[in-house]
Amino acid sequence: MNRNMLNFTVGPVMMDDTLRLENSEQIPYFRTPEFSAIMKENESYLCQFLDAPKDSRMIFMTGSGTASMEAAVMNVFTAQDKVLVVNGGSFGHRFVELCTIHGIPFTEIHLNYGEPLTQKHLDAFNNQGYTGLIMQHHETSTGVLYDLSMVGAFCKKNNIFLLVDAISSFMADPLSMQQDAIGAVIMGSQKAMALPPGLSFICATPKAIQRITSHKVSSLYFNLADYLTNGERGQTPFTPAVGTLLLLHTQLKKIAEQGGVATIIKHTQEIAQYFRDGIKDLPLKNYSVSPSNAVTALTSTTGKSAYDIFTEMKDKYQIYICPNGGELKDLIFRVGHIGYITKQALDTLLAALHDMHKHGAL
Ligand SMILES: *Cc1c(COP(=O)(O)O)cnc(C)c1O
């Protein structure tokens, strides 16, 4: 496998040279005050970048993003809740599956692929005793970025606990837990944080902590109360992905030094804009009407299979773009704007797309 291919997917994404070098070092023993201190700093950086309310805590899970989605659903909600789930694509659908498996009563707000969530969708559920709302910030499968301030206002008015999967939007699109009254946020290491896969994170506000510590979950590994207790001393109940947590620390520290998360969001937005401007003359249409900075979801206006475009880009040009699965396989391919992307790499991608167009492959 060629591990030096350009990678414009939505994760894992390209890492910068400093992180790649650090990634080759030995993994230290971790039940030490030194590692605990690093973890406490990781916690404080992440809470700061999320604009989390005072006394919020981070939960560090070793497991991909879905592990934290499942853990959050199991620990925050119970069979006594009544939850709304926004389902606008494959990640929204995952929450539907999780609520079903864990017996959380829910109503689905089903959106067509690419359709934004509107006030009208929410207004149908005012004053009906809902206690929770679960959604993505960015539905990565279709590239739709939802309006969290609209949802936050609805949840505040109805006293609803808002759980947001920001796995693909954190560090790519602005997010403020305090402004939008978000109860808990989920993140993952391999998206805009540009780290190896295997870690995910839950930011729990005091409201979330209250729910987590008062519920009893039937799970050992996914018992978040245990993570909160261990986290007080900068530790986790079980062996975490120690190496990746150290990379996380390097990354967060660097971001803080460069002016915080706003700087990296601005950079991502510029990359997205440069790409979108660069394909204006190609027979490709942006699939999402409210796109995230993290990704551009594209469909061929000449009806070419999106999956064939992905395959040709991989095999002929040694460039990864992101295919879609299921029903969207032939309709949409996605180009990610997250991770370590240089202007030179972007120009290479744009040249490859124009070359494909020249011989009728788009
Ligand atoms: C990538 C992603 C996930 C998690 O996927 P994993 O493969 O479990 O890491 C969840 N939600 C969204 C919105 C994502 O983009």
Image (cartoon, rainbow, N blue to C red):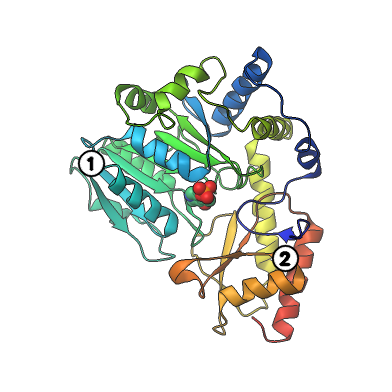
Mark on residue 82? 1
In the image, residue 255 lies at what x, y percent? 70, 35
Dot 2: few (<14), some (14–19), or many (≥20) neighbours within 10 Å? Answer: many
Amino acid type assigned to the residue bearing label 1 in the image: Lys
| Res 254 quadrant in image | top right
Q: Secondary structure at mark 2?
A: strand
Q: Is residue 219 above or below residue 86?
A: above
Q: Horizontal placement of 93 versus 361: left or right? A: left
Front position in the image: 138 or 239 = 239
Mark 2 — residue? 319
Q: Residue at x 30, y 26 (%)?
A: 216
Mark on residue 276? none
Q: Quadrant of the N terminus?
A: bottom right
In the image, residue 192 lies at what x, y percent? 62, 46
Q: Residue at x 49, y 60 (%)?
A: 141
Can the viewer see residue 310 in this picture? yes
In the image, residue 284 lies at what x, y percent? 60, 76
Q: Is residue 28 above or below residue 143?
A: above
The response on whether ligand 1 sits within 8 Å of label 2 is no
Q: Is residue 265 above or below residue 74?
A: below
